[in-house]
Amino acid sequence: GRYEKTIFRGSRKLDESGTGIRQQQQKKVKRTPQEAWNNTIQVAAETAPSSLKSYMDQLAMCENVPRKEKQFRNFTVNSLKLRGPSGEKVKGEIWALLAKARDDEKKIREEQEKKDKEAKLAAQKQNEAAQASKKSNSKTVSDSDDESNSSSGSETSAQALPSEKAVTKVIKKALKKSSNKQMKFKALRKQVQHSFSLKADKEGKKKLKCLLQQCVDSNPEKLVMNGKIVTLTK
């Protein structure tokens, strides 16, 4: 009678917790605790010592073997006819064997879950990194397109360079900020190049140099070039 009650309580508990057979059919992967326990018994039966082998094989053929020790001991009295002191000893050995098998399985499962979790996290990070690089790549491409449009102009034709007026303004501004209102011609060229975001190659630098020289020559009352130094006089 007690054994039947155990079965009933067990299966009712499974249904209530939502891990009953219905869900198992949907997911197939998710085993009920009872199925997992039956599997543990089968695994333990395969590796059981010869003294317990016959008992374990009988247990493996039973369904609804209780998962708690007290009920399990009562169950084995009827199903395995284990009675008296010697029966108690065998019951203890069987339970110890099953408990160990269950712990081992739990450890393996936890390790597997940990690995899965780590793998999932790694995949997520990789995915995020890929998304980020994808974004920055598309950004870089559009940026470099803009730059190549403006810089290819400055590298090939004089029209793409900024106007003399604009460059003169930058020269004066730069000289005003510098000490003694003086700057080396090369530093000034770099300043102008930076101000207009010009990505000039050798040819472009040459043209920019000429343009700067032109600006200085066109403003003799304000800009004086002495050797390689340009000075703002007013």
Image (cartoon, grey):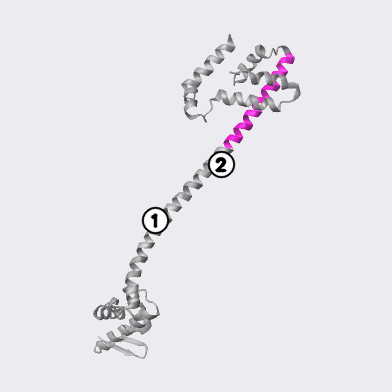
Label 2, secondary structure: give it: helix
In primary-sequence order, the first of circles 1 and 2 is 2
Q: Nearer the viewer, residue 21 or 167?
A: 21
Asked if residue 116 is positioned above or below residue 206 in the image, the reply reads: above
Q: Residue placed at 53% from the left, 18% from the top?
A: 10
214 horizontally vs 199: left or right: left
- Please give the label number shown on residue 115: 2
Give the x, y percent position of residue 42.
Answer: 65, 25
Check whether the beta carbons of the residues at disc 1 and disc 2 lie within 8 A of each other: no
Amino acid at pointer 1: Lys
Q: Position of residue 64 (x, y in %)?
A: 58, 18
Residue 170: quadrant of the picture:
bottom left
Magenta region, residue range: 85-110
The residue that disc 1 covers is 135
Three-letter amino acid code of the residue under disc 2: Lys
Q: Position of residue 82 (x, y in %)?
A: 70, 13
Per the image, label 1 sits on a secondary structure element best described as helix
Frontmost of labels 1 and 2 is: 1
* 113 to 23, vertically: above or below: below
